[in-house]
Image (cartoon, rainbow, N blue to C red):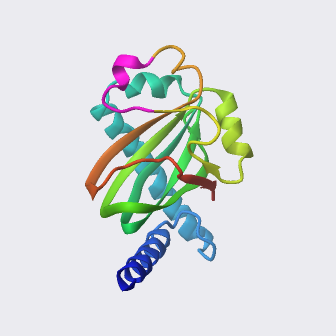
Amino acid sequence: MIIRRTALIGALLGFSALLAGCGAGLPGASESEKSADRSELNAQASDTLSRLAASQPEADQVIRKARGLLIFPEIVKGGLVVGASAGDGVFRSNGKTQGYYRSTAVSYGLQAGVTKFGYVVAFMDQASIDYLDQSDGWEIGVGPVVTVADEGFASRFSSTTLNEGIVVFFVGQEGFFAGTGIEGTKVTRL
């Protein structure tokens, strides 16, 4: 019982710290602070796309064909029994930033560790972008079809994959966690 409470309290404190580090849209921040945070976030997003292209050459074709990209340069995830992750990102369409988003998730189960990673969500059709725009907090895995670009992705992606739904690429995972996933992740506009 004490171990469960300690794990829960630790996870909640860790989650609070994760959210505190996501500053691109926090209420109470001055406009100049938000602008500086957003400029940094945009630079990190561009770097994330460069790292993705270097590490996964098949991503270039998907990115060029995408109608929009949701880029999360750094998600921090940690937990012991109860886990949490959070990070801020940008939505780009036609090469221009259209908005800022936050990615958060809470999980429970046999898990332990701390990791950080980035991810890029490629929206392949307008219907998927419309779903993001119309959702009051989009939960990944609910709504448009999501394809996770893992090691075998290059051998199975097709013209259908490139014309509809969403393709997700992970970038630069560091640390250790019992698995990096986005199912159940909630994405909200800042």
Location of residue 109 in the rendering, given as x and y in whole percent from the top left corner: 41, 61
- Number of marks in the rendered image: 0
Name the residue: 54% across, 35% down.
95
Q: Residue at x 34, y 43 (%)?
A: 171
Q: Residue pushed farthest right?
A: 134
Residue 121 at x, y = what percent? 50, 39
> Considering depth in this image, is 58 or 158 the residue closer to the camera?
158
- Say above or below: 124 vs 69: above
Q: Residue at x 46, y 25 (%)?
A: 62
Q: Quadrant of residue 28?
A: bottom right
Give the quadrant of residue 29. bottom right
Q: Quadrant of residue 101?
A: bottom right
Q: In this view, which residue lies farthest toward the left?
A: 175
Q: Nearer the viewer, residue 120 or 147?
A: 147
The stretch in magenta equals 148-157
Question: In the image, is residue 155 part of the stretch drawn in magenta?
Answer: yes
Locate residue 46 relative to residue 152 in the image: left or right: right
In-image side of 128 versus 13 (left or right): right
Rendered view: 13 above or below 168: below
Farthest top residue in view: 159
Quarter the N terminus occupies: bottom left
Task: Return the x and y of residue 103 as percentages of the image width and height.
Answer: 53, 55
Residue found farthest to the bottom = 2
Q: Position of residue 48 (x, y in %)?
A: 38, 44
Pick the quarter of the image with the C terminus.
bottom right
